[in-house]
Image: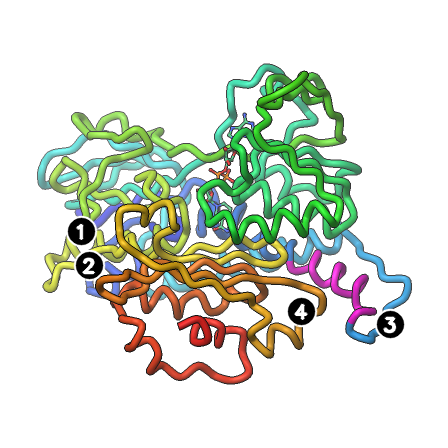
């Protein structure tokens, strides 16, 4: 049998593409060597958020007094927290399996390798069997990057995000190398569960790609709470559970912790694609155009493998666009990269969409800022917390260029801002939208 579409990788890009193509009546084979759901569901977004939710419950109970609630003898059982995380993952993976079965996709639970390709046929091999398809979608994702720092390789004290998620016991203390998204989410988890945490970041700031006024609110809170954050500091070497780091100024320092989490980025998974002769790459992954086509006519790529923006929701949207292009659907779909929301699940959460001030440098714009405390619901539910909402408005066109927020639960309403950015709403159009009261989302209306 020759399939319409072969997909390598069953993460958010792969399973979204499989569903979309099969719903259009196309035959699909999807290969997944680990569990369906990919990094996001198995060793990324979902398990992290599940653990973070337990940590937040514990932390809130410890600090319930500020809401007039007495909770004495509050404890947690980390083994149980980890078990619940596994249960959540199992349930969601089973849901994806069910959906793909219902859509009649052929799911092959094995690693696939491309054997050959012509403009009308791709031949793959998995678990000793050959498969043929008209089109190929590469969604092989990414893996934790292991930096070439002496002492990192084969060091039992070193964890990456996958080993941290797999642990059934909490570390006694933790050094986190890399103050990016993964680093700060794990810093939140361990800190809220009482583990002493040090974050070491090579850049002058943590979360360097985000709006720094928003990040400052987080850093101030975390440092006050006792998280040690060393920026402008490069990790030079590891020796067992000791880390030697060099600050931009002054002498090198040596720190020690039971475990060292390395979270310095991810790299695309390129194994099994060697037979795709002539496939072009960028510095970050497989090169694709706006329709997710590679330079080889019947080969598409979506998700982290493209190295564009490593987020699950970008991956699934890229997959939708790729399948739509394969099906030659009109109108041609595109991804609005200017309106991709992103969330960092710290406490408080950070959520943003669109351009930062730095990115909007060449566009005449005004910056509006407002403390989250202008929202009644925020004040009611965030005792003693501060938060910030920042909006960039194009001076000429009066459109929303970007929104950057810190304050719970901004992850839940950043989609409203994404909508405004995506649709190119002017401030006057956005003003006509009614937001429910009392919700923290009203901050988006207050700021207009
Ligand atoms: P990242 O790129 O977000 O952060 C890595 C950080 O490590 C950077 O700030 C970098 O300056 C720093 N760094 C690099 N080398 C260093 C060194 N030798 N010493 C100290 N610091 C060093 O990468 P990540 O946090 O590993 O996340 C990987 C990907 O996964 C990202 O694309 C991220 O967006 C995605 N992700 C997203 C979410 C979410 O959406 N909530 C959660 C987790 C991961």
- Give the residue at x 58% y 65%: 408
Gap between marks 4 and 3, in whole Å? Answer: 17 Å
How many other residues sit within 10 Å of disc 4, few (<14), some (14-19) or many (≥20)? some
The C terminus sits in image quarter: bottom left
Gap between marks 4 and 2, in whole Å? Answer: 50 Å
Which residue sits furthest right?
73
Q: Which of the 4 quarters of the picture holds residue 134?
A: top left
Taking depth in this image into account, of 273 and 390 the one nearest to the observer is 390
Image-based side of 335 in relation to 418, left or right: left
The label on residue 382 is: 4
Residue that carries the numbered disc 2 in the rendered image: 26
- Residue 286 position, x and y percent, is 27, 35
Between disc 4 and disc 2, the foreground one is: 4
Secondary structure, mark 3, is: loop
Q: Earlier in the sequence, mark 2 or mark 1?
A: 1
Residue that carries the numbered disc 1 in the rendered image: 4
Between disc 4 and disc 3, the foreground one is: 4
How many other residues sit within 10 Å of disc 2, few (<14), some (14-19) or many (≥20)? some
How many other residues sit within 10 Å of disc 3, few (<14), some (14-19) or many (≥20)? few
The label on residue 16 is: none
Above or below, 425 against 323 in this view is below
CB under 8 Å between discs 2 and 1: yes
- Residue 252 position, x and y percent, is 67, 17
Residue that carries the numbered disc 3 in the rendered image: 70
- Give the residue at x 69% y 36%: 198
Main SS type for the magenta part? helix
Is residue 319 visible to us here? no
Q: Earlier in the sequence, mark 4 or mark 2?
A: 2
């Amino acid at each position: 049998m020759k399939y319409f579409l072969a997909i390598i990788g069953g993460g958010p890009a792969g399973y979204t593409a499989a569903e979309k193509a099969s719903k259009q009546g196309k035959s699909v084979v999807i290969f997944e060597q680990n569990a369906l759901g990919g990094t996001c569901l198995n060793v990324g977004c979902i398990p992290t958020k599940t653990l973070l939710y337990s940590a937040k419950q514990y932390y809130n109970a410890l600090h319930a007094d500020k809401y007039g609630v007495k909770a004495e003898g509050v404890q947690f059982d980390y083994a149980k927290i980890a078990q619940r995380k596994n249960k959540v993952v199992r349930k969601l993976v089973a849901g994806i399996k069910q959906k793909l079965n219902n859509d009649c996709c052929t799911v092959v639970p094995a690693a696939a390798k491309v054997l050959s390709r012509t403009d009308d046929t791709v031949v793959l091999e998995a678990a000793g069997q050959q498969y043929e398809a008209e089109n190929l979608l590469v969604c092989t994702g990414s893996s934790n990057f292991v930096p070439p720092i002496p002492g990192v390789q084969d060091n039992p004290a070193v964890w990456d995000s996958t080993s941290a998620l797999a642990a059934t016991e909490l570390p006694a203390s933790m050094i986190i190398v890399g103050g990016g998204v993964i680093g700060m989410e794990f810093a939140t988890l361990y800190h809220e569960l009482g583990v002493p945490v040090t974050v070491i970041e090579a850049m002058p700031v943590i979360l360097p790609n985000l709006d720094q006024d928003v990040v400052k609110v987080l850093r101030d809170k975390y440092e006050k709470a006792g998280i040690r954050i060393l920026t402008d500091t490069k990790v030079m070497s590891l020796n067992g559970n000791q880390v030697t780091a060099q600050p931009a100024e002054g002498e090198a320092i040596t720190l020690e912790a039971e475990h060292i989490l390395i979270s310095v980025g991810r790299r695309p998974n390129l194994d099994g694609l060697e037979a795709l002769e002539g496939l072009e790459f960028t510095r970050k992954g497989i090169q694709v155009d706006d329709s997710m086509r590679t330079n080889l006519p019947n080969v598409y790529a979506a998700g982290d493998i493209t190295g564009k923006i490593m987020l699950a929701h970008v991956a699934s949207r890229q997959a939708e666009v790729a399948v739509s292009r394969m099906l030659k659907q009109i109108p041609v779909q595109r991804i609005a990269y200017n309106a991709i929301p992103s969330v960092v699940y710290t406490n408080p959460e950070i959520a943003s969409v669109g351009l930062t001030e730095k990115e909007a440098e060449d566009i005449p714009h005004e910056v509006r800022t407002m403390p989250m405390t202008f929202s009644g619901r925020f004040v009611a539910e965030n005792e003693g917390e501060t938060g910030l909402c920042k909006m960039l408005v194009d001076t000429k066109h009066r459109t929303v260029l970007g929104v950057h927020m810190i304050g719970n639960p901004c992850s839940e309403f950043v989609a409203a801002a994404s909508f405004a950015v995506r649709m190119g709403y002017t401030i006057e159009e956005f003003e006509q939208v009614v937001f429910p009261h009392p919700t923290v989302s009203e901050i988006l209306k207050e700021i207009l």
